[in-house]
Image (tube, rainbow, N blue to C red):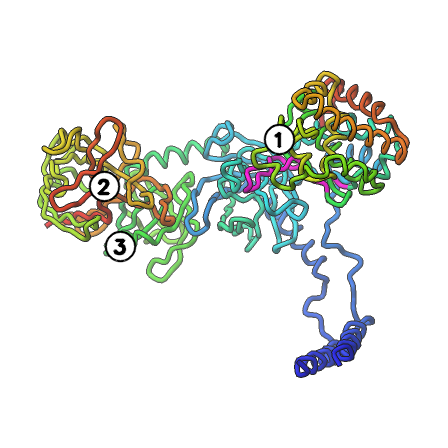
C-alpha cells in the first residue's frame, strides 16, 4: 500500500510541477548577478581580465562578497593595494611555476576557477585559525591578505605553502594517489586532536611534516607535498631534524610515493617542480610590480 | 497513516489545479532582477549626487545596547569612497581621508557593501584569536530607506541601525571632525537639560551623557546619538509632545539645543551650583544584607571643589568631589582599619562582581573607575542623586554595568572585605535625596 501511495503522490506532484511550463516567464534578459559596471572597472580589473581570466579561466574575487565567504567567521575585505601585489605574486610564483613544468594547458585545466582574497585572519572558536580553504577543486580562499609582506620567507611560509597545499587536494581528487600512502601511518591519524597539544616535534617523530598532517591521509599528502616543494634544502633538513632517523625514514617513504604519483599520474618530476617553485619564490620579491591607480 | 497519504494526495491535486491559472496578472511590470538593478542605479545616483558628501552615524556591538555613535564622513564616486572618522583607528588620525571601494548586492534585500579594506571603517570588524567577533561592527548594510535627505540602513551581521545624512555645505572632513571634538569637549561639562516647549518649562529633564540620551525619570531607556558639527543626531527619533524629533542644533551662547525642525522645542542646560548641594540627605541603597537607608550629612570641604559625607554606612567621613554639578565618588583610603583588623580601610568602587559576589576591579590608588551621583530627580532646592557608573563596561549579569560601592581592608596586596556594624560590605542602587 505504502508504495502505491507514494507513486500517486509523485504523479500528482509531477502534474503540479509540469503543468505550468508554458506560462513560466523566466526573465533571461536580466540577471540578479550584476555585470560589472564598466564605469567602475579599474586598470587592475582590466589587467586581471587580460592576464588571469582570459589565459587561465580564473575569476579573482578581491572585493568582499558575503555569499563567497564562510559565515562562521567575522572577516574584513582585502586591501586593494595588497590584492594587486598578491595577485602578481601568485601569478609568477604559482601559476607560472606549473606553466613552466607542465605547460599552460595543464594550469588552465586544473587550477581552481575562483580565487577569493580575504583581508583578515579566519579565527574559529576552537583557538585555531584557517589559513586557506579549497572548495571542491573550484575555489580557493586565501586569508590574511592585509598582512602580506614582500619578503620571500614570509610569502613562502604564509601563502605559497597553503596554495600548493590546496592545489594538491585538487590533484589527488582528480587522480587518486596509491593506497600504499595511507598505510604508512595508518594508526597515527587523529582527526581534530591535532590541534590540542600535539607538538611539531611529536609529529615529526611519528613521521609527519606538521601536526596538521596527522589529521587524516589527504591532509598528510597535501602537507608533505606542499612543505617539500616550498622548502629549500636547508629548511627541509631543519624540518626533518626533530624526527630523528625514524621519523625521517617515514617522511621519505611518503615522499617517494608522491614522487611516483607525480611521475606516473601527471608526468612531472616532483624535484623539478620544487626547483622551479623555489627559484620563483626567491625572485618574486624583485618582480617589477605594476602599480595600478 | 493512510489518512496522511490521502491528505498528501489531496494537496498534490490542489496544487495541480491551482497552478494552472493562465491569466495571472503580474503585480509588477518588470522582473525582480530588473527592478533590483534599477533600484541600485537610483541609490547610487542619490549617493553620488550629494554635493558635499554624507555623514554616517556609526554604531557597533550588541544592537540592543550598542557602542557609538561616531561620525564618519563619506563621499561616493564611481565605486570608490573617500572616508574619514572622528576617531583615530588603526593608526589613521581622526579626520584623515582613506579611499576604498563600495558596491551594491542583493541577498538579504538591497545591500550597500564597503567591499575593499578601509582601516577606518573595518577597524570595527577585525577579529582576533581572543575575540573572534571583533568589535561587532558591520560593513555591509541592508538599505531600509533611501532618499536624498536621509538613508536608513541596518548592519547585516550585527543589526545596528545606522543613519546617513547629506552634508549641507562644502566642509573639509578634518575641519568637521575638529568641530565635533570641540562640541564634545563643551558637552562633557554639561549633562542635564530642561526640556521646554515654546519657553514653557516641562517637568522633564534629559541627560546627555557620553552619546546617551535619556529622560532622567527613565534612565534605562536610552537613545544613542552622535555629535555632529552643529549639535546631535539621534540614532532613532524621540517623541516630544506627540511629535518625533531626531536632530538638534546647539547654541553655544545660551547653552541650549533646539530641534532642527522646530525651534520651539528646546533643551536648556541646567546644573547645580556648588552651594546648592550641602545639607541633610537620605542615603538609600541595596546591600548584601538587604535594603537600607540612613540620614547622612553632606558638608562643604574645599570650597567649590569637594564635600564631606558623614554616615554610619561608610564608618568614616568620605570625600565627594563637585564636578560640573554632579557628585563624584572615587576609591579612597579611610585610614587605619578599626581594632580587630589590620591594614587600611578603603571605600572602593566596582562595576561588576564575580559569581561569589566579590567585587572585581575595585582597589585602585589612581581611580580609573569612578561613580557619579547624577541629579536625576527633584528640584534645585531638593535634588535627588542617583549614583551611576561613569563607565559603560558590560557587567557579568547582562548589558548594564553593575554599580557598586564597597568597603574593604587592604593588607599588603590581598583584599579582605570589611563590614560596618550592620554587616554591609557592598551596596548598589544608591540614591541620595535631600531632605
Pointers 2 and 3 within a single chain: yes
Quick check: marks 1 and 3 in contact, CB under 8 Å?
A: no
Per the rendered image, the range of residues in magenta is A114-134
Above or below: residue A183 compared with residue A268:
below
- The quarter holding residue A144 reads top right
Question: Which residue lies at the image location 61% right of the left edge and 47% below the top edge?
Answer: A71
- Chain assignment, label 3: B
Q: Nearer the viewer, residue B271 or B61?
A: B61
Question: Which residue lies under the disc numbered 1?
Answer: A146
Name the residue: 49% across, 51% down: B161
Chain under callout 2: B
Which type of secondary structure does the marked residue at label 2 adopt?
Answer: strand
| Left or right of residue A12: residue B144 | left
Please name whichever residue, A105 or B27, is drawn nearer the observer in this view of the structure: A105
Q: Position of residue B201 (x, y in %)?
A: 23, 54
**Other-residue count near label 1 (Cα within 10 Å), few / some / many at <14 / 14–19 / ≥20:** many
Q: Residue at x 46, y 33 (%)?
A: B87
The residues tagged by marks 2 and 3 sit, at their Cα atoms, a distance apart of: 23 Å
> Closest to the observer: B102 or B341?
B341
Q: Earlier in the sequence, mark 2 or mark 3?
A: 3
- The residue where tag 3 is placed is B217
Circle 3 residues within 10 Å: few <14, some 14–19, many ≥20: some
> Which quarter of the rendered picture does the N terminus of chain B lie within?
bottom right
Amino acid at each position: 500500500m505504502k508504495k502505491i501511495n507514494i507513486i500517486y503522490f509523485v504523479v500528482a506532484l509531477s502534474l503540479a510541477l509540469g503543468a505550468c511550463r508554458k506560462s513560466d516567464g523566466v526573465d533571461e534578459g536580466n540577471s540578479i548577478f550584476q555585470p560589472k559596471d564598466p564605469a567602475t572597472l579599474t586598470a587592475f580589473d582590466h589587467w586581471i581580465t587580460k592576464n588571469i581570466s582570459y589565459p587561465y579561466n580564473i575569476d579573482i574575487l578581491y572585493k568582499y562578497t558575503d555569499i563567497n565567504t564562510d559565515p562562521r567567521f567575522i572577516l574584513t575585505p582585502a586591501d586593494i593595494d595588497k590584492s594587486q601585489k598578491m595577485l602578481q605574486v601568485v601569478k609568477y610564483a604559482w601559476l607560472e611555476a606549473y606553466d613552466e613544468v607542465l605547460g599552460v594547458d595543464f594550469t588552465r585545466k586544473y587550477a581552481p576557477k575562483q580565487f577569493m582574497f580575504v583581508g583578515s585572519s579566519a579565527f574559529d572558536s576552537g583557538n585555531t585559525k584557517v589559513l586557506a580553504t579549497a572548495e571542491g577543486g573550484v575555489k580557493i580562499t586565501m586569508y590574511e591578505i592585509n598582512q602580506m609582506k614582500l619578503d620571500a620567507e614570509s610569502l613562502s611560509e604564509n601563502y605559497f605553502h597553503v596554495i600548493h597545499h590546496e592545489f594538491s587536494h585538487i590533484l589527488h581528487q582528480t587522480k587518486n594517489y596509491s593506497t600504499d600512502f595511507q598505510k604508512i601511518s595508518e594508526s597515527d591519524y587523529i582527526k581534530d586532536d591535532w590541534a590540542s597539544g600535539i607538538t611539531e616535534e611529536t609529529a615529526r617523530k611519528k613521521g609527519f611534516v606538521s601536526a596538521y598532517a596527522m589529521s587524516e591521509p589527504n591532509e598528510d599528502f597535501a602537507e608533505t607535498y606542499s612543505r617539500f616543494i616550498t622548502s629549500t634544502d636547508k629548511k627541509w633538513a631543519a624540518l626533518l631534524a626533530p624526527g630523528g632517523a625514524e621519523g625521517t625514514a617515514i617522511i621519505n617513504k611518503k615522499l617517494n610515493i608522491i614522487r611516483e604519483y607525480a611521475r606516473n599520474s601527471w608526468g612531472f618530476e616532483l624535484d623539478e617542480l620544487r626547483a622551479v617553485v623555489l627559484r620563483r619564490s626567491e625572485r618574486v620579491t624583485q618582480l617589477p610590480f605594476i602599480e595600478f591607480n | 497513516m493512510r489518512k496522511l497519504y490521502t491528505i498528501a494526495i489531496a494537496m498534490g491535486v490542489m496544487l495541480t489545479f491551482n497552478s494552472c491559472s493562465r491569466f495571472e496578472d503580474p503585480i509588477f511590470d518588470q522582473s525582480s532582477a530588473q527592478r533590483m538593478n534599477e533600484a541600485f542605479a537610483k541609490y547610487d545616483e542619490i549617493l553620488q549626487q550629494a554635493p558635499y558628501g554624507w555623514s554616517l552615524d556609526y554604531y557597533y556591538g550588541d544592537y540592543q545596547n550598542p557602542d557609538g555613535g561616531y561620525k564618519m564622513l563619506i563621499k561616493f564616486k564611481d565605486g570608490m569612497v573617500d572616508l574619514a572618522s572622528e576617531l583615530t583607528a588603526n593608526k589613521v588620525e581622526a579626520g584623515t581621508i582613506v579611499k576604498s571601494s563600495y558596491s551594491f548586492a542583493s541577498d538579504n534585500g538591497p545591500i550597500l557593501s564597503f567591499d575593499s579594506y578601509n582601516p577606518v571603517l573595518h577597524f570595527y570588524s577585525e577579529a582576533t584569536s581572543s575575540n573572534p567577533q571583533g568589535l561587532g561592527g558591520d560593513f555591509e548594510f541592508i538599505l531600509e530607506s533611501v532618499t536624498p535627505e536621509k538613508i536608513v540602513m541596518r548592519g547585516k551581521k550585527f543589526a545596528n541601525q545606522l543613519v546617513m545624512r547629506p552634508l549641507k555645505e562644502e566642509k573639509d572632513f578634518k575641519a568637521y571632525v575638529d568641530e565635533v571634538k570641540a562640541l564634545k569637549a563643551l558637552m562633557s561639562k554639561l549633562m542635564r537639560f530642561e526640556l521646554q516647549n515654546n519657553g514653557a518649562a516641562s517637568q522633564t529633564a534629559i541627560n546627555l551623557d557620553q552619546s546617551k540620551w535619556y529622560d532622567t525619570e527613565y534612565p534605562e531607556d536610552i537613545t544613542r546619538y552622535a555629535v555632529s558639527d552643529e549639535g546631535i543626531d539621534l540614532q532613532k527619533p524621540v517623541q516630544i509632545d506627540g511629535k518625533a524629533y531626531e536632530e538638534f542644533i546647539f547654541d553655544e551662547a545660551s547653552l541650549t539645543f533646539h530641534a532642527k525642525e522646530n525651534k520651539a522645542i528646546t533643551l536648556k542646560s541646567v546644573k547645580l551650583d556648588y552651594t546648592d548641594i550641602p545639607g541633610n540627605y537620605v542615603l538609600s541603597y541595596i546591600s548584601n544584607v538587604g535594603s537600607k537607608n540612613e540620614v547622612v550629612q553632606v558638608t562643604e570641604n574645599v570650597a567649590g571643589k569637594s564635600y564631606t559625607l558623614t554616615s554610619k554606612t561608610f564608618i568614616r567621613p568620605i570625600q565627594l568631589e563637585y564636578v560640573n554639578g554632579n557628585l563624584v565618588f572615587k576609591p579612597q583610603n579611610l585610614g587605619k582599619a578599626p581594632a580587630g583588623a589590620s591594614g587600611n580601610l578603603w571605600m572602593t568602587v566596582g562595576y561588576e562582581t564575580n559569581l561569589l559576589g566579590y567585587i572585581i576591579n575595585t582597589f585602585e590608588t589612581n581611580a580609573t573607575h569612578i561613580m557619579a551621583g547624577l541629579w536625576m530627580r527633584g528640584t534645585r532646592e531638593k535634588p535627588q542623586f542617583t549614583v551611576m557608573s561613569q563607565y559603560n563596561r558590560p557587567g557579568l549579569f547582562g548589558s548594564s554595568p553593575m554599580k557598586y560601592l564597597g568597603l574593604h581592608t587592604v593588607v599588603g596586596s590581598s583584599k579582605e572585605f570589611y563590614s560596618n556594624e550592620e554587616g554591609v560590605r557592598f551596596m548598589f542602587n544608591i540614591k541620595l535625596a535631600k531632605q
